[in-house]
Image (cartoon, grey):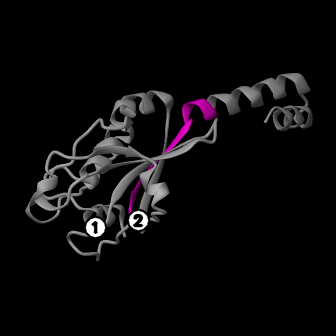
Amino acid sequence: MGIVGGTVSVIAGGKFANGAASGAFVHLFNTEFNRYMLGIHSNVSSKGSFSSGHAWISIYDKITGKFNTYGLWATESGLSSNGSGGVFENLELYKNYSFESNLLVDISEVQYDKISGMLESGSDTWYVTHTCADYARDVFYKASGTYLNVDDYFGIETPRKLAESIGN
């Protein structure tokens, strides 16, 4: 960006060094301001069944190139799963999950700091009334300010309702 800024400055009749410094500064400012890309994902479409699918968060660090996923998982099955599990890092990657629906936004380091505690392994617990979709929505909302409805029948949060809210 420094070379581009310097070249444009010379073409416009200015000094290369001034344009290069300005271009580099703008690039660094924009990169730092929008350092991360935050994603929210559902692996089921809005036409999926009530109890199917999974929802999770992803974060891509544009400076380091590091990519991670975060999802709330139960460690038991059925109603006995209440109060079990927690947040797991990269489980979606290990399971080769792909998404049917996703929404991506750029966030700053300040916005990332608001959710960093929510991304720690074991930082949350799965309940029938607090599912993977609810967790993903809460993290996404806290960082981006964008609220997505995940409440399905009986107020139970589902990945299919998240997909509908995203627009798929």
Left or right: where 34 falls relative to 165: right
Question: 60 or 84: nearer the eye?
Answer: 84
Q: Residue at x 25, y 64 (%)?
A: 161
Q: Is residue 148 above or below residue 98?
A: above
Question: 147 or 115: nearer the eye?
Answer: 115
Disc 1 secondary structure class = helix
* Residue 139, image x, y percentages: 33, 42
Report the magenta residues as a range: 30-42
N-terminal of the pair, mark 1 or mark 2, is 2
The quarter of the picture where the N terminus appears is: top right
Question: 18 or 77: nearer the eye?
Answer: 77
Q: Residue at x 39, y 41 (%)?
A: 144
The 10 Å Cα crowd at callout 2, few under 14, some 14 to 19, many 20 or more, is many
Left or right: where 13 falls relative to 93: right
Q: Residue at x 89, y 36 (%)?
A: 7
* Residue 25, image x, y percentages: 71, 26
The 10 Å Cα crowd at callout 1, few under 14, some 14 to 19, many 20 or more, is many
Q: Residue at x 8, y 62 (%)?
A: 154
Does the stretch in magenta take in 52?
A: no
Place residue 115 in its image quadrant. top left
Answer yes or no: do the residues labelled 1 and 2 have beta carbons within 8 Å?
no
The quarter of the picture where the C terminus appears is: bottom left
Disc 2 secondary structure class = strand
* Residue 103, image x, y percentages: 43, 56
What residue is shown with label 1?
160
Which label sits on residue 101? Answer: 2
Type of the residue with mark 2: Ser
Left or right: where 69 falls relative to 4: left
* Residue 46, image x, y percentages: 30, 72
Question: 93 or 99: nearer the eye?
Answer: 93
